Amino acid sequence: MMKHKPKIVWLQAITCNGNTHSLLSANPSRFELLLNTFDFFYHPSITTEKTLDDVLNLKEIDFLLLEGAVTSNKQFYQISDSSVTDLLKKVSKKSKYIISVGSCASYGGIHAKFEENSDIKGLQDTLNIVELKKLKQPIINLTGCPVHPEWILQTLFTLKEFGVISLDMQSRPKDIYYGLAHHGCTRNEYFEWKVEAKSFGHKEGCLFYEEGCRGPMTHSNCNRILWNDVNTKTRAGMPCIGCTEFDFPRDNMLETKKNIGIPSEVPFGINKRAYLTITGVAKTFKIDRLNKKLIE
Ligand code: SF4
Ligand code: SF4
């Protein structure tokens, strides 16, 4: 007898397709496992056999994944003849699990900054309280710009295997978002001894003090599971721009905001006075090794 494969329906709203690209860059053996385990029923630009009408005719959807920000303004964006909001209201009722894939679907992202249309939002803010209560499970937010492919896979496999997943206050899976992008960064020693990076792209120095790195304030495991299994922004010499948090994107993301020379925001969960005391002491130790180039 053929084993039931849970159905995945992936819809796209206002999006750059970045999360789709990210999923397609998943580790090939993991991606193959996904295709063998789930029935990838519909994706507007990947699957070819099924149409949106087939999705609307389904009695039940196991996993509804949405990529992109939502608007009810049909003149601004519509799918087939429906507004994105109306379409989502129809399909969300019959979906077992709903996952907002990426920061735009979760919070509206960069599109929500578009002042000409003020109703661009994340999925959770689109549905009213009555509609949210009628859902079979709370909406899961996989934040990130884009989301790491492994976060999608891990969430789908956990839900398939165990039926539930533990969420944080922002409805993100705790297993993925409990730590910070700072954890596992190869520059931690520079951070501790307050040795600044001389510029972008270098292997030495920490990017927190001048280049705006948000690693200590950003919930993600980028530096522990790596992108394409090999690298991350901070390892390559580019600051973490905090793409998994609700206030992304911020202005002037590549510089550290300061007040009288002191970073305005300090690492998450640390008292500002304690932080300033510790860093003040750390800076007095001039550690020779940390001020040399690692590769000439
Ligand atoms: S570069 Fe960013 S993530 Fe890495 S140690 Fe410095 S602050 Fe932390
Ligand atoms: S390192 Fe920071 S900006 Fe880059 S993907 Fe991870 S959370 Fe987003």
Image: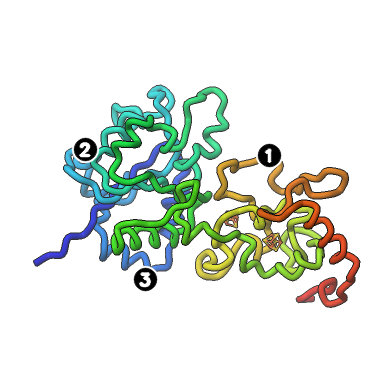
Q: CA distance from mark 3 to mark 1?
A: 38 Å
The answer to which of 201 and 235 lies nearer the viewer is 235
- Between 273 and 2, the one lying in front of the other is 273
> Looking at numbered disc 3 in the image, what kind of residue is underneath it?
Ser
Res 78 visible: yes
Other residues around mark 1 within 10 Å, as few (<14) / some (14–19) / many (≥20): few
- Which tag, 2 or 3, sits closer to the chain's start? 3
The answer to which image quadrant residue 27 occupies is bottom left
Residue shown at 27% from the left, 47% from the top? 96
Quadrant including the N terminus: bottom left
Mark toward the start of the polypeptide (1 vs 2): 2
54 relative to 78 in the view: left or right: left
Residue 257 on image: x %, y %: 77, 45
Q: Amino acid at mark 1?
A: Asp
Name above or below for residue 105 compared with residue 184: above
Q: Amino acid at mark 2?
A: Leu
User: Which SS class for mark 2?
Assistant: helix
Q: Are marks 3 and 1 in contact (CB under 8 Å)?
A: no
Would you place residue 55 above or below residue 87 in this image? below
| Ligand 2 - quadrant of the structure image | bottom right
Q: Which residue is mark 1?
A: 251
Question: Which residue is identified by label 2?
Answer: 56
Q: Secondary structure at mark 1?
A: loop
Separation of marks 1 and 2 at Cα, in angstroms: 40 Å
Q: Residue furthest left?
A: 1
Pointer 3 or 1: first along the chain: 3
Image point (51%, 25%), residue name: 118
Q: Residues within 10 Å of mark 2 (few under 14, many from 20)?
A: some
Q: Select label 3 or label 1 by which is in front.
A: 1
Q: Which residue was labeled with disc 3?
A: 29
